[in-house]
Amino acid sequence: MTCWCLLQMALLLCFSTTALSMNYSLLRFQQRRSDTVCQKLLRQLPSTPQHCLEVRMDFQFPEEMRQVQQFRKEDAVLVIYEMLQQIFGILTRDFSSTGWSETIIEDLLVELQGQMDHLEPIQKEIMQKKTFTMGDMTVLHLKKYYFSLMQYLKSMEYNSCAWTVVRVQMLMNFSVLKRLTVYLQD
C-alpha cells in the first residue's frame, strides 16, 4: 500500500461520519485528486478514430451544469455523487468491442467507488436535512442526460465508435466535476 493510501486512510479514521461530513476541505482535496486520476485513466484508453466522428450526437448536457458557480456546497455534493454513480453504471456495461484494457476500467471503477464512498455519508445527511437548493432538479436533468448516453450505447449495440463518443462525454464530465469540487469548502 502506498504512503498516499495510508495517509488517506489515517485521515478518514480521524473523522467520524458526522465530523467528515462537516469537513468539506478534506472532501474537496480527495475529490480533486480522484478526478485527476479518473481523467488520466480515461485518456489511457484508445482515442477517437476519424470514422467515429460521424456517429457523434448532442446528448444535451444539462444547461445548469455549464454554470456551476451557482451551486452551493450541498448542491455540489448531490450533483457530484449523481454523476459518479451514473458514470460508474455506464462503465459496467459491455465494452468488449472497444479493445479497452480491462485493468484500466477496473482501476477507474475502483477510483469511482472510492469517490462515492467518501461522498455517500454527506449525501445522505444533505438529503435527510434537505439543505440543498437546486441539487434535486439538477440531479433529475442529469439522470435524463445519462439515460440518453445509455440509450445511445444500446442503440449502437455497444460498438467501439459509440464507446469512443461516450468516452469523450465522460472526459467532459470529469472536467465539470473538477470545477464543481471548488464549491466544496468549509
Image (cartoon, rainbow, N blue to C red):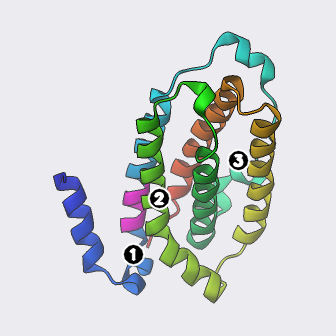
Residue 45 vertical position relative to residue 71 in the rendered view, above or below = above
Nearer the observer, disc 2 or disc 3? 2
| Image quarter (top left, top right, bottom left or bottom right) of the N terminus | bottom left
Q: Which mark is residue 52?
A: none
Q: Residue 167 in the image: x percent, y percent?
A: 61, 34
Badge 3 is on which residue?
66
Determine the CA span between mark 2 and mark 1: 20 Å
Horizontal arrangement in the rendering, residue 114 relative to residue 69 (left or right) = left
For the C terminus, the image quarter is: bottom left
Find disc 2 in the rendering and name its residue: 113
Name the N-terminal-most of marks 2 and 1: 1
Spot occupied by residue 55 in the image (x, y as percentages of width and height): 79, 22
Judged from the image, the secondary structure of the residue bearing numbered disc 1 is loop
Label 2 – label 3 distance at C-alpha: 25 Å
Q: Which residues are magenta?
A: 26-31
Q: Amino acid type of disc 3?
A: Arg
- For label 2, the SS is helix
- Residue 94 appears left or right of 100: right
- Residue 23's tag is 1
Asked whether the viewer can see residue 141, the reply is: yes
